[in-house]
Amino acid sequence: MDILFDVLRTAIAPSTAAFALAAIGLNFHFGLTGLLNMGQAGFMLLGMYGFAISIQQGWPIWLAVIVGLVAAALFALLLGWPTLKLRGDYLAIVTIAAAEMVRFLGRSQSLKDLTGASSGIRGSDYKAPFEELSPFPDSIVEIGPFSMHGSRSSSWWLTLVTWALVFVCAGLFWRLANSPWGRVLKGVREDEDAVRSLGKNVYSYKMQALIIGGVIGALGGITWSLGNSVQPDSMGRPTTFWLWTLLLLGGAATVFGPLLGSILFWSSLTLVKSLASAFIPSDVLAPTELEPFSLVLVGVTLMLLVVFRPQGVLGNKKELAF
Amino acid sequence: MLATLDRRALLRAALVFLIAAVGITAVLTMGGAAEAATAETEAVTTTASSGGTNLLIQNLFNGIVFGLLLALASVGLSLIYGTTGLSNFAHGEMVTFGAMITYFLATPQEVSFPLLPFSFSVNWPFWLAAPVGIAIATGFGWIQDKIIWSQLRRRRVAMVQQMIVSIGLSLALVNFIQWWMGGRPVRLVTSIDPRNQYGPISVGNVTLISMAIAIAAILGVAFFLQRTRLGRATRAVSDNPALASASGIKVNSIIRIVWMMAAGLAALGGILLALYQQGIGFDDGTKLLMMMFAAVTLGGLGHPYGALVGSLIIGIVAEVSTVWLPPDLKFATALGILIIVLLVRPQGILGKPERVG
């Protein structure tokens, strides 16, 4: 019973919503346009840094959010400008390299006073303005089996805000994907040359998709940092790979795919971990080995998914970039 | 060569580089209070560079060593890309795997398999453990191609899907290695390598032997590709698989051999790297993957000698940049070079222009 509640708690947790947000961004890139962005974690990290550093400078919260989003938009511009004309796998290599560069710069000792180097920025240094906006009481609130703090860190307040953002962005995706603009993007995904021959500027459309997806990714990063802390190494390559796994699990190019994917991904991870710790004796699988063990399963899941069911749970096989 | 360069691409690359440089400098100066830290690093550099050019020469030498080891690891990546078109994201784990298997066989400490509750100690001498480790890694390359990649090729799974499969494999393998060997770096040999001074260069004996082995292995690969029938067939497949198949070359068995060679060379690279760095962690190969991609792309994706040229350049740039830049940014510098190269000459130094998308 406890395991069930653990799983449910993970399913509604703010970090699950934050990953759903970042996956919606990735859905704009890959699902809609067919861009192989392997650096979504870099966008998230930039959003987090922009937000946290602005607040540390004493700027108001709305400005800090804008700084985080603008940083991601500029990153997308800088990244897309030269690479969107190259073949797909080049974009993959460049985005992954650029995301790693952001991480290396963030954890570099020479930027210690700004980014806190490898230890990152502590949550208490930037969370206060957001927590002060909370309408909920400043204490533990229990609703049914769920008990969370009203406004601090991973709180009811953060849960409400992030899931609201997820639904707003999913709505945005639905609206844009069904607009004339979205149909052009789908055309780019299916056959770039055909769209070009219709007189559309493919490059500019790809750029717009890259920026929108990156900005939503940064939003995911900001909400994630509000529940945790800004830590460059938590946004490394594995994070991007998890995003890909959960997007493909839920179904790329669908409105609710990223949502469902994120919920399924994190709750099954919790389920596997709790079941393993409950039923496998610790001399066979020590508690420290649980994390790598469950991530091995994630990797295998990703492989099997891509080969046997690339459209995921909700997707349509015709709507895939590959 | 310059005639083939698109002037607009060049301009674009220069601009991106400029913006990035301005951005980084702005951020650096914005952290006003960062001066203390900078002063500290400056102090370190001034004391270290008391020899002046000596530091440069030492770093250049370190760069060549690192470049050679990188070349061993990335030759396979390049060959696989050349023959199959796959950007194999799981190649970094092959490097770690080779070193870890050798550790498993050589260490006097108790080792065990995951999920099996008993532990034992193999404790072979290093000279025996290393070749056996490479052999096991080669076998792993064979198994990988047998049960994964050849199946995907047969099912005609798209390249992008295969790339994501390799990402999944990388995630699974790196965590499997962590699960198996633990999170801490392990040392293949416990003895301390004494450093000797040759003119301005200080180097350990083990490093010299590693360099010799690396050079020998690279020459061996070159000989194989240039002089043997199988090597010629490999180059033919790399050039044009359909035509190679039509002229009677068994493309699939060539690819199988390439996978085995790639895995074996990566394992050798991993073992030498573990000796050079005096230890290897479960994610060292994964960290190295980006450097390998940088090297291979720089030299020309799929071009067998491109990996060598690219690796040496990346190795030297990464090490020499530490003379001026903080050492924790050396990988970032190498990645920056990768991005600039992709902007200016996406096919790489030795690549053919038609590979550009």
Image (cartoon, rainbow, N blue to C red):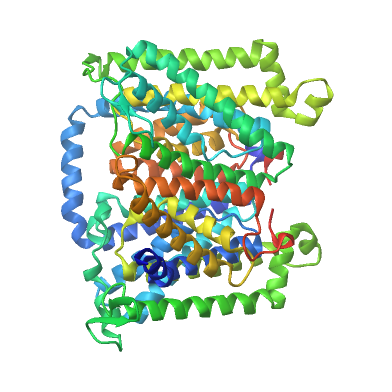
**Residue for point 38% across, 45% down:** A292
Q: Nearer the viewer, residue A142 or A83?
A: A142
Which residue is farthest right? B246
Apparent side of residue A249 relative to residue B229 in the rendered image (left or right): left
- Residue B325 seen by the camera: no
Q: How many marks?
A: 0
**Residue for point 58% across, 58% down:** A248
**Residue for point 65% across, 48% down:** A307
Q: Nearer the viewer, residue A273 or A254?
A: A273
**Residue for point 63% across, 79% down:** A175
Vertical comparison of A53 with B131: above or below: below
- Residue A143 seen by the camera: yes
Vertical comparison of B103 with B87: above or below: above
Residue B141 position in % (x across, y down): 55, 27
Residue A4's image quarter? bottom left
Vertical comparison of B150 with B201: above or below: below
Residue A124 position in % (x across, y down): 22, 70
Residue B160 position in % (x across, y down): 64, 47
Residue A90 position in % (x across, y down): 59, 47
